[in-house]
Image: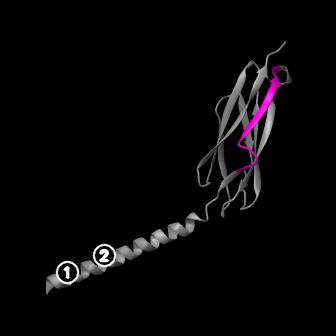
């Protein structure tokens, strides 16, 4: 009799545990569709073409959009070198709304082709997104 009661209790516990796991999995699937999604509008690579070192820094503004269901928060933007600086929308970007990431390249002392990346970190689905600027710097003459 004790064995039957033990087996019955074990089966009941297993069924309850499996049901709880299924509910957690269903909730995770529902929440997955509500994430923020960072999307770059137009281009993720900007070519400045040929620029003159003597003209000083050049800037390009990338437009981003939140294509997700929850607000998008850009937490940090990291350039691949010290010659590149960035500014970005600090406020949360609501679903369907846009923001900006402004990237400035300083060509001083760099007369050569360049290609620099900027990593964008957010609460978006992919975690990080890479933007690229490139061009050719003509030296001082």
Left or right side of 81 for 139: right
First in sequence: mark 1 or mark 2? 1
Question: What quarter of the picture does the C terminus occupy?
Answer: top right
Q: Secondary structure at mark 2?
A: helix
Residue under circle 1?
A: 6
The circle on residue 18 is none
Residue at 14% x, 84% y is: 2
Q: Is residue 16 magenta?
A: no
In this view, 94 is above or below 103: below
Judge whether 131 appears above or below 10 on screen.
above
Residue 93 visible, this angle: yes
The CA distance from mark 1 to mark 2 is 12 Å
Q: What kind of colouring is applied to the model shown?
A: one colour
Q: Secondary structure at mark 1?
A: helix
Query: What crowding class fits label 2: few (fewer than 14 Cα within 10 Å), some (14-19), or many (20 or more)?
Result: few
- Residue 92 visible in the picture: no
**135 left or right, relative to 22:** right
What secondary structure characterizes most of the magenta part?
strand
Q: Which residues are magenta?
A: 40-53
Quarter of the picture holding the N terminus: bottom left
Could you tell me if the residues under marks 1 and 2 are in contact, i.e. CB atoms within 8 Å? no
Residue 135 placement (x, y as % from top left)? 75, 28
- Name the residue carrying label 2: 14
In the image, residue 44 lies in the stretch drawn in magenta: yes
Q: In the rendering, at what x and y percent does residue 47 appear?
A: 76, 34
Query: Which residue: 36% across, 74% down?
Result: 18
State the count of labels: 2
Q: Which of pointers 1 and 2 indicates the residue nearer the eye?
A: 2
Q: Position of residue 16 (x, y in %)?
A: 35, 78
Quarter of the image holding residue 84? Answer: top right
Residue farthest to the bottom, as pictured:
1
Disc 1: CA contacts within 10 A as few (<14), some (14-19) or many (>=20): few
């Amino acid at each position: 009799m004790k064995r039957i009661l033990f087996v019955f209790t074990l089966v009941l516990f297993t069924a309850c545990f499996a049901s709880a796991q299924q509910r957690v999995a269903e909730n995770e699937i529902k929440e997955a569709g509500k994430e923020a999604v960072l999307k770059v509008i137009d281009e993720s690579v900007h070519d400045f073409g040929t620029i003159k070192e003597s003209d000083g820094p050049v800037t390009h503004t990338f437009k981003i959009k939140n294509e997700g269901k929850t607000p998008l928060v850009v937490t940090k933007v990291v350039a691949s070198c010290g010659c590149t600086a960035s500014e970005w929308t600090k406020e949360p970007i609501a679903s369907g709304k846009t923001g900006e990431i402004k990237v400035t390249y300083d060509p001083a002392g760099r007369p050569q082709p360049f290609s620099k990346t900027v990593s964008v970190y957010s609460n978006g689905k992919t975690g990080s997104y890479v933007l690229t600027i490139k061009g050719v710097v003509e030296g001082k003459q």
